[in-house]
Amino acid sequence: MSQQVLVEQRETDAGPSLRPPVRTDWRIEAKRVTKLFPKTGWRSGGEATAVLDGFDLRIGAGEFVSLLGPSGCGKSTFLNILAGLESYNGGAVLIDGKRVEGVNKNVGVVFQGYALFPWLTAQRNVEVGLKIRGVPKAERRERAAKVLKTVGLESAADRLPHQLSGGMRQRVAIARVLAYEPEVLVFDEPFAALDAQTREFLQGELLRIWEAGETKKTVLFVTHSIDEAIFLSDRIAVMTRAPGTVKALIDVDLPRPRDLETRSSEDFVHIRSRVARILEEEVRLGNDDH
């Protein structure tokens, strides 16, 4: 079997260390990020829990990276920090060399919940964000129609959310973000609530949309599914138990475009085994701590 997996975790005299790949076009950089949550409030002497501690991650322009880790390790917390929805207590988070401070219009966020307005059609739901950004009416109609076509929903543009399946509603949510034309897309388990068949279909659709762009967006994708992370990603960042940091970076050197045969390939299975072992070790260590 060819070595399709490169775990950027090297054994040295001092123990394991992480070495990011050699490149300079980093779009996202997280440097020794610390995030604390209060246990008893921020009163004098109040305790705090570290959710992230020394979190390091770099993502190149146009790269698709998935974040995996045990429950409660801080995956979604880091995503919220990157999107400017949460502050952090130490280290630095940079996008294109600029420190993240508040919501960045160049970052599009897709959550598990669709958050669609039930009284608006698919077309109007996509237009909402553009209207808030002051995009003229004719232009926002054109852009909304274009992205609905991109996600395969041009025929459903006039339907209300309750007339759409769960998968279609999630595609509307993705279209709404694409309409902003952000350079960075972050996904927080967007397919977790869907049935397995719909989930696999939307994974393929997401790759089709990502690969079809004139310039590939930079993507951070949070998931609990090893198979989903492998199928989608260029690299997988595997986190430790809380307080979370990156334990291993794994290159997913599988050919693109990917299809059903990709999932059953020998290399896919090999990568899955490697990732599962790393996660199993972290879960076991977490149980030992208790």
Image (cartoon, rainbow, N blue to C red):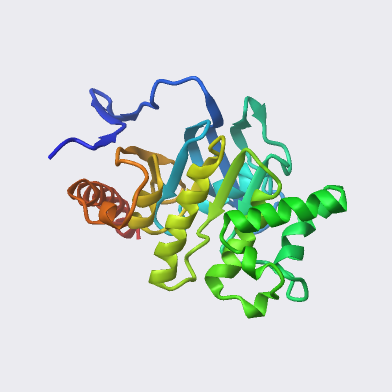
Q: Position of residue 140 (x, y in %)?
A: 79, 52
Depth order, front residue of 201/2: 201
Q: Foreground: 283 or 163?
A: 163
Residue at the outermost front position: 155
Where is 227 relative to 26, above or below? below
Which quadrant: the C terminus? bottom left
Residue 289 placement (x, y as % from top left): 34, 55
Relative vertical location of residue 97 with respect to residue 251 in this rendering, above or below: above
Q: Is residue 151 visible?
A: yes
Expressed as whole percent of the image width and height from the top left, the position of residue 211 reads: 48, 43
Q: Position of residue 123 (x, y in %)?
A: 73, 64
**Left or right of 13 in this view: 282:** right
Of residue 2 and residue 239, the one placed in the foreground of this image is 2
The quarter in which the N terminus is drawn is top left
Instruction: State the residue at coordinates (55%, 73%).
Output: 166
- Is any part of residue 39 visible from this angle? no
